[in-house]
Image (cartoon, rainbow, N blue to C red):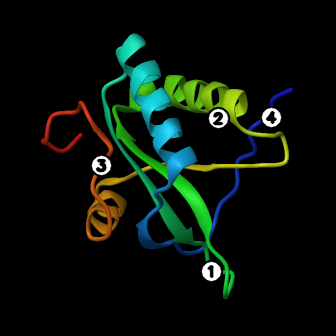
Amino acid sequence: MARSPEEFSVESIRFLGEQDGVPERELKARLCNAFAQMNIRCRAYLVRADFGDPGTFNVALCVRTELSASTAVKVTVNRVFSEMFRTEEHLDLLILSDDQEREVQAVAKPFLSSLASQTL
């Protein structure tokens, strides 16, 4: 059974670099497929992020999309992630602002880019 998504806020976010490995590549492939099937236009990055807790990092799926698609993105990510991983696992999802996307782009390339380059 899938965990219910939880929303939280943080004081600061520091993007550390791309998160990659065998399970991550499978997750990326499944997300690309799901977003394409639903015609969700976005740029997506899978990164390690520091939310201000010293010595730890979280894996975060960072998505830049049109505001109207953000709910569909959340539902799709939750479905795909829960199909792949145990319920005790979690994935942080950030819907990026322009400034946040520039910060992410400094440390990672998008694994999906179906959104035009112009600012939303």
Q: Disc 3 versus disc 4: distance between alpha carbons?
A: 26 Å
Q: Nearer the viewer, mark 3 or mark 4?
A: 3
Q: Disc 2 versus disc 1: distance between alpha carbons?
A: 24 Å
Mark toward the start of the polypeptide (2 vs 4): 4
Asked if disc 3 and disc 1 are in contact, CB closer than 8 Å, the reply is no
Counting from the top left corner in percent of width and height, residue 102 is at 26, 63
Residue type at mark 2 is: Phe
Q: Nearer the viewer, mark 3 or mark 1?
A: 3
Name the residue tied to disc 4.
4
Name the residue tied to disc 2.
81
| Label 2: which secondary element | helix
Q: Residue, x 61% and y 25% (percent of image)?
A: 75
Name the residue tied to disc 1.
52
Residue type at mark 4 is: Ser
| Label 3: which secondary element | loop
Q: Residues within 10 Å of mark 2 (few under 14, many from 20)?
A: many
Name the residue tied to disc 3.
110
Residue placed most toward the observer, 23 or 119: 23
| Label 4: which secondary element | loop
Residue type at mark 3 is: Pro
Mark toward the start of the polypeptide (2 vs 1): 1
Figure check: 58 above or below 24: below
Q: Residues within 10 Å of mark 1 (few under 14, many from 20)?
A: few
Q: Disc 2 versus disc 4: distance between alpha carbons?
A: 12 Å
Mark toward the start of the polypeptide (3 vs 4): 4
Q: Disc 2 versus disc 3: distance between alpha carbons?
A: 18 Å
Figure check: 48 above or below 21: below
Q: Residue, x 27% and y 62% (percent of image)?
A: 105
Residue 13's disc is none
Residue type at mark 1 is: Gly
Q: Disc 1 versus disc 4: distance between alpha carbons?
A: 24 Å
Q: Residue, x 57% and y 45% (percent of image)?
A: 23
